[in-house]
Amino acid sequence: MSDYENDFSRRLFLKGAGATAGAGALSMLPIQMAFAAAFPERNIQVFVPTRAGGGADRNLRAFTGVWKNYLKQNFEAGFYPGAAGRVGYETYMGKAKADCYNLIFGNMGPEVLNWVVKKPTFPLDSYFYFAQVDADPACVFVSSKSKFKHIDDIIAEGKKRTLTVGTSRLAHPASLGALVLAQKTGAKFNLIPLSGGRNTRGGVTTGEVDFGVLPASSVLRKKIKVLALFDDTNPLPKRMPDAVLTNDHFKLGLPPLIAGARAFGIKKEAVEKHPDRFKVLTDTLQKVYTDPAYKKAVVKTKAPWEFIKYGNVEDCAKYVKYVTDLGQEYRTLLTGKK
């Protein structure tokens, strides 16, 4: 990943995505500029490496429902679940044309951790993320009927016996949070992948597992109580009044561990070939975040508006590096093999 970042900074975004795109536009012939001005002339295809109906789908529809008004074209989403996101990325990198009409939209953390566990068939520096949509912190949650009323109760019990921890998948930032917490406190946790947020919530509320870890927005429901956040602040104190900030409480010394960081990605080749088109994409998408229609769309999905956060190319690269480095440290545990 360090090679990717060095190459990324040196070759493509030395002075920012906008500057690169602008320089590319200046080098075009008049006829090329005329064609560029028409972009996009057809719908934008979005590859989603998860099943329909989840957090990525929810975020994508809310965002593109407004973005299309600025691009004057619609978005067509294709869902490719399987192998913890690997199927979607392999499909995108293998079949999508490098023309800026094809994007990928996924949760950066879990999908990057996929490459830590097992490298993909394509070079890691052949795509990058350019627009983060949200920042959804990892959390520790229990059933409202659980005997655990405070995160300290979980740690104390975890020092007596091994607690089972439900998670959507092993290679996930929320899983990393649990592993770091166990290491720093001396508690013993056994991660149980339950395949998706819905199943993880079910495993916790039915008592199949002792507690769970997921992005916070996934558990703001009845019958569930959030006991801890892997963040520096509690963005929703009224909805998560019992949430302890693990960094402060346990002195973990970690930056915020964002478990839900959905973002748009693109092939690097597409930007190198069509910097003018990429500039249109980045210029228009930034307008979405301040559009009142977007906030209305997010609120309609019942997702917390407080978790919406724009992140540019550099922000995304920084997040990817942090999660990758942490994943490398805990790689053995993330694979489920000791």
Image (cartoon, helix red, strand yellow):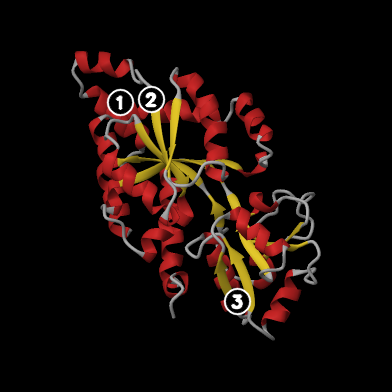
Q: Which residue is mark 1?
A: 276
Q: Where does the image place residue 179, in percent across and percent down from the top left?
A: 55, 72
Amino acid type for the residue under numbered disc 2: Val
Q: CA distance from mark 2 to mark 1?
A: 7 Å
At horizontal 69% and vertical 71% (from top left) the residue drawn is: 210
Mark 3 vs mark 1: give the one in front.
3
Numbered badge on residue 189 = 3
Of pointers 2 and 3, the one earlier in the residue sequence? 3
Work out whether residue 244 can be spotted. Answer: no
Q: Which residue is mark 2?
A: 280
At horizontal 31% and vertical 61% (from top left) the residue drawn is: 119
The answer to whether marks 2 and 1 mark residues whose Cβ atoms lie closer than 8 Å is: yes
Q: Where does the image place residue 201, in percent across and percent down from the top left?
A: 66, 58
Please tell me in which quadrant of the rendered image residue 79 appears.
top left
Residue 215, compared with residue 77, is above or below; it is: below
Name the secondary structure under disc 2: helix
Of the pair 303 and 190, the residue shown nearer to us: 190
Amino acid type for the residue under numbered disc 3: Phe
Please tell me in which quadrant of the rendered image residue 161 appears.
bottom right
Amino acid type for the residue under numbered disc 1: Asp
Q: CA distance from mark 3 to mark 1?
A: 50 Å
Of pointers 3 and 1, the one earlier in the residue sequence? 3
